[in-house]
Amino acid sequence: MKFLILLACKNLSRYKRRTIITSSVIAVGLMMFLIVDSLLVGIDRESVRNLRWYETSSVRIMHGDYWEDRMLLPLDVAIEDPDTMVGMLEDAGYRATERIMFSAEMILYGDYFGEAGNLPVQVTAVDPTRDNGVFKFADTLIEGRFAEPGSNELVMGSWMAEDIGAEVGYWVTLVTRGNGGFFEAMDMQITGIVNCPNPNVNRSLLMVPIDTIRDYLAMEGLATEIDIALPELADIEEEKEKIAALVSEWESTITIMGWDEMASDYLAAIEAEQNMSMILLFLVFLIAAVGISNTMIMVINERIRELGMLRALGMKDGDIHVLFLLEAAGIGLLGSIIGTVLGIALNFYLVGHGIDYGFLMREMDLAYRIQSIFRGAWNLRGILITFISGVVLSVVVAWFPTKRATSKDIPSCLRHQ
């Protein structure tokens, strides 16, 4: 075996140009695979993070009947005495905040917006003293300030503000139904505009103080949800059990859900998009495999006479087969090293800077919770699989032409042109 390995290495150095060309084909294919894989992993991780930071939190407590009718944003199925529940959670070391979600019609005035109009909106009433401890809006303010407790003030997402021409200082009116079915109109002044990494939030966010909304909508001592922030690597199911034990006195009236349950539709959409991306990734790999296969077949066909000479000198077919496979493995190893090194080098840029797709995300909803910059991520498992695949692929595509070549008789090999 040592002799075959040395001979394979000598042959690779003897045919330098062919070795370099074939290795380059493998390297380019593997490099592209690593780049696309890095982007897919990075997009998935950042989307989940932005979903938890700006939409769902890690765990949410709701009234037991709320989730089924959540699309209607009902106010009559709410958690009672949420302040006590939040206090118990905070005493146990959790970061928690209460919110009220409701739908409304937002009336725009011509004096501010150029022309009068109205549009349906979803409003989030938050506790200004606690909300930024659970959600990550503290560093997203680009104009003005956050709404103060007890005020008729409103904070708006930047894309919504841009679409309707809103500016800090403008007034709008929110018309909605209160708890009990009565209509209520609330004049609100825009005091802040936020721009966060989650495009869905930028498109639709309207935040108002929760105590103001409780006065207007007869929601005193009620909340439609309590949101809880957990460390990124926390075991959601285990934490849900701990939280359930803490709030056991509300057990018969509440339900506790993790972010993955609340975002099941989103995760299904992302999985479908990832399946399509994996198909494209497979096609990239398949194109590389075809290129490698064609090159290896050409290499072996060019050396049919050499193969016949080796057999005439007494080398066994099995040894010849192993020799060619070792050469293929050597080419694959060289290509894998180059491709992996290039992929890792480019990934430093993808992880640090990313690719700006803001022009696309602003006009289209691709389901990803990323506003503009698609960044890569380090996936050691993917790098290892890619490296091994380059070697294995080279050996596999060399197997069949080598077998066919050794099936010819010696005179035919020697006469081969």
Image: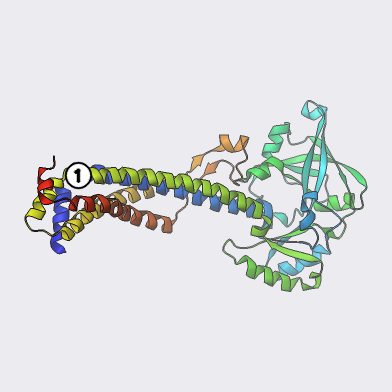
Relative to 343, residue 120 above or below = above
In this orientation, does residue 352 appear? no
Residue drawn at x 45%, y 46% is 281
- The location of residue 370, given as percent across then percent down, is 58, 45
- The location of residue 178, given as percent across then percent down, is 89, 49
On the rendered image, what quadrant is the N terminus found in? bottom left
- The location of residue 369, given as percent across then percent down, is 61, 47
Q: What amino acid does circle 1 point to? A: Asn
Residue drawn at x 69%, y 33% is 162
Tell me the SS state at disc 1.
helix
Q: Is residue 313 toward the left or the right of residue 290 in the image? A: left
Q: Is residue 27 toward the left or the right of residue 242 in the image? A: left
Which of the pair 412/353 is nearer the observer?
412
Quadrant of residue 153 within the rendered picture? top right
In this orientation, does residue 121 appear? yes
Which of the pair 301/73 is nearer the observer?
301
Q: Is residue 380 toward the left or the right of residue 363 in the image? A: left
In the picture of the structure, the residue carrying the numbered disc 1 is 301
Farthest left residue in view: 313
Residue drawn at x 45%, y 50% is 37
Relative to 242, residue 192 above or below = above
Disc 1 residue crowd, few under 14, some 14–19, many 20+, Cα 10 Å: some
